Amino acid sequence: MSDVPAENVGIVGGADDIERWRGVAAENDEDMPWSVSLLLRRRTRALLGDLLRPHRRSMVVVAVAIVVGTGAQMAIPALVGYGIDHGISDAHRGHDLTVAWVVAAIVGCALVQAWLTRTFLLGAGRIGQAAVIELRRRVFNHFQLLSLSFHERYTSGRVISRLTSDFDAINALLDAGLDTLITSTLTIGSVTVILLVLDWPLALVALVSLIPLGFLTRWYQQRSTVAYRRTREAIALVIVHFTESLRGIRAVQAFRREPRNNDIFRGLNERNREAMTTSFQLLTVYWPGIRAIGNLTTAAVLLYGGDRVIHGHMGVGVLAAFVLYLRQFFEPMAEVSQFYDAFQGAAAGIEKLAGVLDERPAVPMQTTSRQRPEGRFSGAIAVDNVTFSYREGREILHDFSLQIPAGQTVALLGNTGAGKSTLARLLARFYDPTAGAIAIDGIPLPDLAESDLRRAVAMVTQESFMFTGSVADNIAFGRPGASREEIEAAGREVGVDALVCHLRDGYDESVGKNGARLSAGQRQLIAFARALLADPAVLILDEASSSLDAPTERLVQRALRTVLADRTALIIAHRLSTVGIADRVLVMADGQLVEDGEPSVLLAEGTGEYAALTRAWRESLV
C-alpha cells in the first residue's frame, strides 16, 4: 500500500480517516503508511505532554526519588565486591569493623531504596490516575461537543470502545507496573556505565550482547506495534457489533437475525483471538530470547573474568560485583518485555483517543455571543438564500429563503426527501448552510453562544429520548435548575398529571431504559413538558405525533396548544390533523417552497398541493 504524500499528512487527521487507514492496513496485513504513523506519534506525544504538564513539580519529585533509589540499588553489588576484597581480608587480620560497615551500608541502601520506591509508586500512581481522569473528562466532553454529523457516521459502538477498552488499556499499563518500565530503563543505563568503570575489557565482552539484543528488540518492537494496533481495532469491532446488536434487539428478534449475528460475532471474536495470539507469540520469542542471551553472556563473563582473576588483573570481589551487576542488566530487559504488551496496548489506545480529541466540530460554537437581544428572544426567523448538501454534489436545499414572524405557528408539509427535516436541523444549527444565512431576531446563528442558541431554539422529535431516571428528571432535562414546583407545573399544563396519577411514585417513578415503561404518547407528553419548562423562543416539532394513535394524538394536540402559546413554532407533519393549530402552511418539494399561505385560504382555492394532500388524507380515513 502506497504511503500518503507528505503534503497530505494534515488532511488525514480525522478520527474516521485514522480508523480507515487502520482497517485497510489490517485487512492487507500491512503497516500503516509512515506519514499516518508519524502523525499518530506526534498527536500521542502532544496529548501526553498536555496531560502531564500540570504535574511537573510532582514529576520532578518522583524523578528524584527514582533516580536516588536506583542509585542506592546500584551501590549494593559494589559494596558486596568491596566486602569480599577488603572486608574478608581485614577480618582475617582481626579487623571486623570493615565487614560491619559494609553490612550496615548494604542495609541502609536497601532501606533507602525501598522507601524511595514507595515514594515513587505513590507519586507516579497519583499522577497517572489524575492524567487518566483528565483524559476521560476531555474525551467525554469532546464527544458531546462534536457536531451531529460526526455522531451520525461514528458508530455508538466505537464511542463506547473509546471510553471503555482504550481506557482499560491505559489503566492496565499503570496496574501492570509502569514503575518497572522506568526503573528498568534507569537500571540498564546505570549498569552499563558501572560495568565499564569496574573493568572495561570484561565490560566489552558483556556489551557484545547488545548486538543480538538490539536486533531482537527491534524485531519485536516493529511487529508488536502493528500487532497491538490490530488487537485494539479487533476488540473495537467486537464491541461495535455487540452494542449495535443489543440496541436493535427488537429488530434482531423480529427478523430472526440471531444466527447471522452469531456468525458475524464469531468471526469478529476469532479475528480478535488471532490478533491477541500473534502478540503473545511475539512475546514468547522475545522474552526467552533475552533470557538465553543473558545466560550465554554470563557464562562468557565468568570464563573470561575467571582468567583475569587467575592472572591477577582483577579481584574476586570485582568479578562477583560484575556478575551481580550483569544480572541486574538482563533481568530488567526481561521485565520490560513482560510489560511491553501493556505499554503497546496503552499506546494504541492513546493514539485513538488523541485522534478523537483532534476531531474538530463541523459546526463550531461560540463560547460567548457576539450579539444578543435585550431580554428574551422574540423568535423571528429569517432564512436567506440557504443552500445545503450532506454530500458534495447532492443539494437538499438550493437558494431557499423564508421569513417567519415572531409568535407564528407554521406547518411544514411535503413528501419524504423534500427537505423538511433538513430545514429543521439547520434552524437548530445541528448543521451550518453551505451558503446563505439563518438568523433569529436578526442575529445570525453562528454569532450566538451555544447556551444562548439552545435557550432560543428547542426541538421535539418523533422519538423523544428518555434518559434513565424519573419522570421529573426527564422533564427537567432542558432546565436542570428548575424547582419541583416548576417541573410539576409544566407537567400539569401539558397533561402529564393524567399519566403520573396512575404511577406508584408519581413524578418520581422511573421511566426505565429509554422510557421503555411508557407508551409513545406518554413519552411525547413528557417531551412537551420538557420543552415547555425550557421555554424556548422557537420550538421545532419534527414528526412529533406521527406514531401516535388517534386518542393519544388528540391528547397531544391539546398539549401542543399549551406548549406553542406565545412562541414561534415550526411543525413538520405528515398527519394533516396537526395542521389545524397552524397559522400558516408551507409545502416543500425538492428543496423549494411550492406553496405558502393560511390553511383556510389554501383549502378554499382547492388547486394547490395542500388542498391535494388534504383530499388524499381525508380519503385515507374513510
Image (cartoon, grey):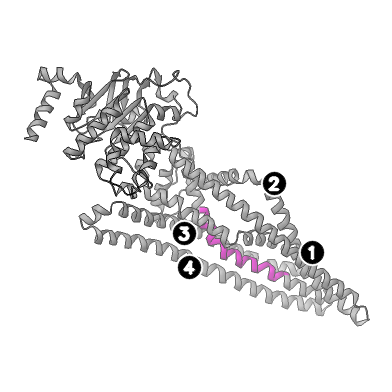
Residue labelled with disc 3: 227
Q: Is residue 575 magenta?
A: no
Residue labelled with disc 2: 57
Residue 292 placement: quadrant: bottom right
Q: Which is more toward the observer, 345 or 583?
A: 583
What secondary structure is marked by label 3? helix
Q: Is residue 333 magenta?
A: yes
* C-alpha gap between disc 3 and disc 4: 10 Å
* Extent of the magenta region: 325-347
* Amino acid under disc 3: Ala
What secondary structure is marked by label 2? helix
What secondary structure is marked by label 1? helix
Q: Position of residue 15 (x, y in %)?
A: 43, 44
* C-alpha gap between disc 2 and disc 3: 36 Å
* Amino acid under disc 4: Gln
Q: Position of residue 46 (x, y in %)?
A: 57, 43
Q: Which is more toward the observer, 582 or 525?
A: 525
The correct choice, above or below, for 480 with respect to 401 in the image is below
Q: Position of residue 315 (x, y in %)?
A: 83, 75
* C-alpha gap between disc 1 and disc 3: 40 Å
Measuring 36% from the left and 33% from the top, which residue is drawn there?
Answer: 489
Q: Main secondary structure of the magenta part?
A: helix
Dot 2 or dot 4: first in sequence order is 2
Residue labelled with disc 1: 197
